Image (cartoon, grey):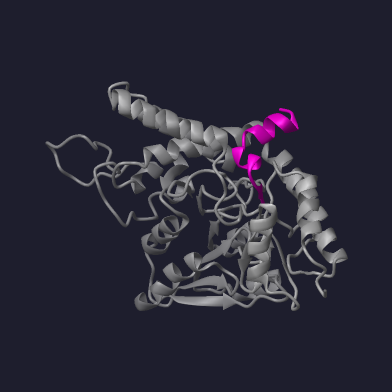
Amino acid sequence: MTPEELRAKFPITRRYNFQDHAGVAPLSAPAADALAAYAREQSETSYVGGTRYRAVEHVRQAAAKLLGAHADEITFIKNTCEGINWVANGIPWITGDNVVSNSMEFPANVYPWMNLEQRGVHVRTTVEEDGRIPFDRLSARIEQRTRVVAISAVQWSNGFRMDLARLGELCQERGVLLFVDAIQALGVHPIDVKAMNIDFLAADGHKWLCGPEGAGIFYCRRELLGHLHPTELGYLCMKHSWDSRERKIDLRDDARRFDSGAYNLAGIAALGGSLDLLLEVGIDEIQWQVKQLTDLLADGLQRKGWRVHSPRGAAEWSGIVSFSSDKHDLAALRDHLLNEFKIVIAQRLGRLRASPHFYNTAEEIEQLIAALPAANA
């Protein structure tokens, strides 16, 4: 696929220099095509063709390939927070247990764990240091009653990326379950749930996966499927889901045991279109391209005097570049970039945040750098 062919897969490039994939990414053309095909089929033949659920199984296989998982360990969620709640509310807690978290997490990965306090489960928070979660400090928070470490693969605010392989090894040694919120990593960074000893993972599709909102991926390690109790029951999670003669709770043996009812078929179809594209290009190639673009951006920002808050070390960088200046109205500057140059970035926590993807170009990065005033001007 040539650069021109790749750019054609993202029609937003015709109108915008879009660098906000950590927010809500544009749909890829394959995702939009799959969504349109679903709508067309539903309007013309409804369920008669029988292709709807066969398509779901294709997307399940694609998601499993992306994660290095088995297909029977994958099901679909409407958002990341739903998957987090499945884990938080599905574990058989005992009063006095605790969860290890950190002070940088997005609220979606905070409140479900805080809600366990009413059940006698405590949250032990690791305090960040200079925009990082020190591994030794995190390790020290894990103790005898720790049941789960809940962490984002990439932090939403400044892009700090956790060493999941090292953390997974630690959790396995300590006998602790590892939950990963992967929404800011999946689609850019390779994640192998087996090699990294990840027990549970959730990620919506509307960021780096370039899918729609409302359709995401949930992973539960096969050995834990019977350990995590579904919090919502319906017909679809039962082995004999269509049998109305004998009514008994007999949950499926795979990750579909968490499916209470009908899928978001339109969203899953669109998500599958993007997953196929990402797998075709290759996550290693995508990661390499994003690294080149974000290095270029971080270097250019620093030359103009901007303070870059995102860790850029070899094992901690991500597609998010957060930067600030005390001399400028950042909200006004963000709006100026959009209105005058069609450059799309975000403002978060008193900083600007750019998050280019693999189809962005060096020229688009240079345009952003040139459009920004000097930090002290």
**Would you place residue 172 above or below residue 374 in this image?**
above
- Residue at image position (11%, 36%) is 245
Quick check: can you spot residue 99?
Answer: yes
Q: Is residue 15 magenta?
A: yes
112 left or right of 151 in image: left
Image quarter in which the C terminus is found: bottom right
Q: Position of residue 67 (x, y in %)?
A: 58, 43
Quarter residue 128 falls in: bottom right
**Would you place residue 115 above or below residue 150 in this image?**
below
Image quarter in which the N terminus is found: top right
Q: Which residues are magenta?
A: 1-18
- Residue at image position (53%, 73%) is 144
Q: Is residue 50 magenta?
A: no
Q: Position of residue 301 (x, y in %)?
A: 81, 63
Quarter residue 288 falls in: top right
> Farthest left residue?
245
Q: Position of residue 25 (x, y in %)?
A: 57, 49
69 left or right of 306 in image: left
> Farthest top residue?
49
Most foreground residue, 300 or 174: 300
Q: Position of residue 159 (x, y in %)?
A: 67, 62
- Residue at image position (65%, 69%) is 332
Most foreground residue, 61 or 295: 295
**Would you place residue 295 above or below residue 115 in this image?**
above
